Amino acid sequence: MKNCNGFMLIEVMIGMFIISVIISVIFPAIYFVQIERVTLKEEKAAEHILQRLTFESLKNTGHLEEKVVYKNNVTYTVIYGQKLTHSELCLQWEGRSGRLYERCSYF
């Protein structure tokens, strides 16, 4: 029999199996990283909105009401609360990951 320089079918199948296992492990990790990047952008937008609303509430001493803010396809709910010693202004939203988030500012 002559010396063949090609691959046998079993070698190709083993190589394809190894590549498919690597891809099946890496793809969910890449997807998770992408979702977390979007979540960080949502949190940054929420902090920006919260700073702006806190500044407006300090400038206007009147009572603030609950309202809804839309930014970057995310719905943020603004909640204002008055305590004995301080006031609080909170933002709540549902992130792309499906989890509920809340950021508050106290003044």
Image: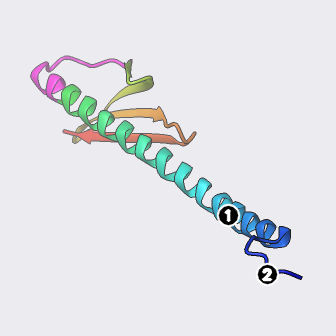
Residue 3 got which mark? 2
Q: Can you say whether 10 is above or below 71 in the image?
A: below
In which image quadrant can residue 70 be found? top left
Q: Earlier in the sequence, mark 2 or mark 1?
A: 2
- Which numbered disc, 2 or 1, marks the residue closer to the eye? 2
Pick whichever, 23 or 96, lies toward us: 23
Instruction: Tell me if 56 is positioned left or right of 87 in this view.
Output: left
In which image quadrant can residue 78 be found? top left
Q: Amino acid at mark 1?
A: Ile
Element class at badge 1? helix
Q: Amino acid at mark 2?
A: Asn
Q: Can you say whether 67 is above or below 36 in the image?
A: above
The residue located at (38%, 24%) in the rendering is 72
Pick whichever, 39 or 67, lies toward us: 39
Residue 19 got which mark? 1
Q: Which residues are magenta?
A: 55-68
Separation of marks 2 and 1 at Cα, in angstroms: 28 Å
Does residue 67 belong to the magenta stretch? Answer: yes
Query: In the rendered image, which quarter contains the N terminus?
Result: bottom right
Image coords of residue 40 (percent x, y): 37, 45
Pick whichever, 29 or 57, lies toward us: 29
Image coords of residue 3 (percent x, y): 79, 81
Q: Can you say whether 5 is above or below 79 in the image?
A: below
Instruction: Tell me if 84 is positioned left or right of 32 in this view.
Output: left
Element class at badge 2? loop
Image coords of residue 75 (percent x, y): 44, 24
The residue located at (73%, 75%) in the rendering is 5
Name the residue furthest front: 2
The residue located at (18%, 39%) in the rendering is 107
Mark 2 residue crowding within 10 angstroms, few (<14) / some (14–19) / many (20+)? few
Instruction: Tell me if 82 is positioned left or right of 26 in this view.
Output: left
The residue located at (38%, 36%) in the rendering is 42
